[in-house]
Amino acid sequence: MDTVYAARNLVHPVESADVAHVVAGELAHRVATPPHTVHLHVEDLVSWVWPNRWTAGHRPAYLDLRTNAGTTARTLQLVREGHILAKHRVSHGTPNRSLRVPSGFLYAVGGGDATVRQR
């Protein structure tokens, strides 16, 4: 998994020098080639999906997504290069309402990027 660092107390650098030293050490010892990352893109009626990136082999437990327009489309599709990898029925297509999709929808992703769309 990626590590996120937050900078703090930049006005008084002496107070945070020990933390900066630890962060610098971790960054210096990172592996040059990170593990393969799966990116999930959106198109058509889907405005965003979370998470949209994860390390291969560590699939998330679920997806949260939102549509950007009211629709009668009730099927989510997982697509790669025009081929449908998986489908999932959804209960609504109301704009700006979250939809939670179980991780089983993602089994077909395997490695490589994919796109979520609603049809």
Image (cartoon, rainbow, N blue to C red):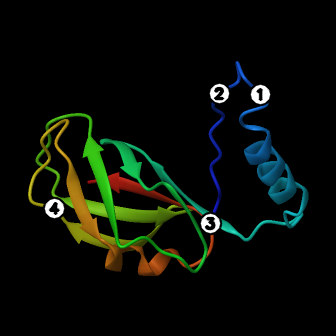
| Residue 5, image x, y percentages | 65, 45
**In the rendered image of this protein, does residue 60 appear above or below residue 14?**
below
Type of the residue with mark 2: Asn
Single out the mark in the foreground, 4 or 3: 3
* Image marks 2 and 1: residues in contact by CB distance under 8 Å: yes
Image quadrant holding the N terminus, namely bottom right
Q: Which mark is residue 32?
A: none
Which is nearer the N-term, disc 2 or disc 3? 3
- The local crowd at label 3, few if under 14, some if 14 to 19, many if 20 or more residues have their Cα within 10 Å, is few
Q: Which mark is residue 90?
A: 4
Marks 1/4: CA distance?
A: 51 Å
| Residue 28, image x, y percentages | 90, 56
Type of the residue with mark 1: Pro
Q: Nearer the viewer, residue 51 or 93?
A: 51
Which is nearer the N-term, disc 2 or disc 4? 2
Marks 4/3: CA distance?
A: 30 Å
For label 1, the residue is 13
Left or right relative to 44: residue 55: right
Q: Secondary structure at mark 1?
A: loop
For label 3, the residue is 1
Marks 2/3: CA distance?
A: 26 Å
Single out the mark in the foreground, 1 or 3: 1
Type of the residue with mark 3: Met
Q: Secondary structure at mark 3?
A: loop
**In the rendered image of this protein, does residue 55 appear above or below residue 22?**
below
In this view, which residue lies farthest toward the front? Answer: 15
- The local crowd at label 2, few if under 14, some if 14 to 19, many if 20 or more residues have their Cα within 10 Å, is few
Q: Nearer the viewer, residue 22 or 77?
A: 22
Marks 2/1: CA distance?
A: 7 Å
Q: Residue at the location (48% across, 74% down)?
A: 59
For label 2, the residue is 9
Q: Residue at the location (17% across, 52% down)?
A: 73
